[in-house]
Amino acid sequence: MGPLTDLRPVPDNQEVFCHPRTDKSLIVELLELQAHMQGEAAARYHFEDVGRVQGSRVLQVQSVQPLNLESLALRGCCQEAWVLSGKLQVAKENQQVAKDVTLHQALLRVPPYQTDLLVTFNHPPPDNRSSVGPENLSPPSWNLGDFEQLVTSLTLHDPSIFGPQ
């Protein structure tokens, strides 16, 4: 898993990782805390914002569930956490046809640092292209369990990433 910066520009507040064999990606973003929104509304706001930024059409929010803070490594500074699953209609650069892409998002609200931490797992449909190289040498495809493990194991090693407090 490597950063996407070789493929397209990535802002300083974001890290993007692409699976080497599929179109799946994981995005970790540090965003300004949307203090005027709480709970499920904040999770929906960030989902719709991702769709808007990507020029996508929001098709459906399938579920929005609170995350148990005790399951998070960041539980000491995270005051609220949500997981949202939904579908966007996305057209990739240089492609005319839009595909329905499932997104799983975790929103970790970190008010001490005025930050909403958003982790997005893009799960597009399989594309039927043959993979390069022998299948048994390719890394396994990411799944929802990998996403959940990432979200629950995130830790803060250096608070200065948020700037002066």
Image (cartoon, helix red, strand yellow):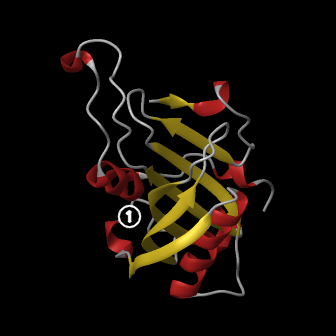
Horizontal and vertical percent position of residue 46: 62, 71
Indicate whether 134 appears above or below 22: above
The location of residue 72, given as percent across then percent down, is 38, 64
Residue at figure coordinates x 34%, y 76% from the top left: 68
| Residue projecting furthest to the left | 136
Q: Position of residue 116 (x, y in %)?
A: 63, 67
Query: Which quarter of the figure is the C terminus placed in?
Result: bottom right
Q: Which residue is mark 1?
A: 72
Q: State the residue lying farthest toward the top.
A: 133
Say how many tags the image has.
1
Q: Residue at x 69, y 62 (%)?
A: 31
Residue depicted at x 60% and y 32%: 4
Amino acid type of the residue tagged 1 in the rendering: Leu
Q: Can residue 146 be seen at all in this image of the molecule? A: yes
Q: Quadrant of the N terminus?
A: top left
In the image shown, does 106 or 80 lie closer to the viewer?
106
21 relative to 136 in the view: left or right: right
Which residue is pictured at 38% across the width and 28% down the height?
A: 21
The residue closer to the viewer here, 134 or 33, is 134
Above or below residue 40? Residue 131 is above
Q: Please say if 45 is above or below 134.
A: below
Residue furthest out toward the front: 96
**In the image shown, does 125 or 156 lie closer to the viewer?**
125
Q: Is residue 78 left or right of residue 64?
A: right
Q: Position of residue 26 (x, y in %)?
A: 48, 46
SS at mark 1 in the image: loop
Can you say whether 103 is above or below 24 in the image? below
Q: Residues within 10 Å of mark 1 (few under 14, many from 20)?
A: some
Asked whether the viewer can see residue 110, the reply is no
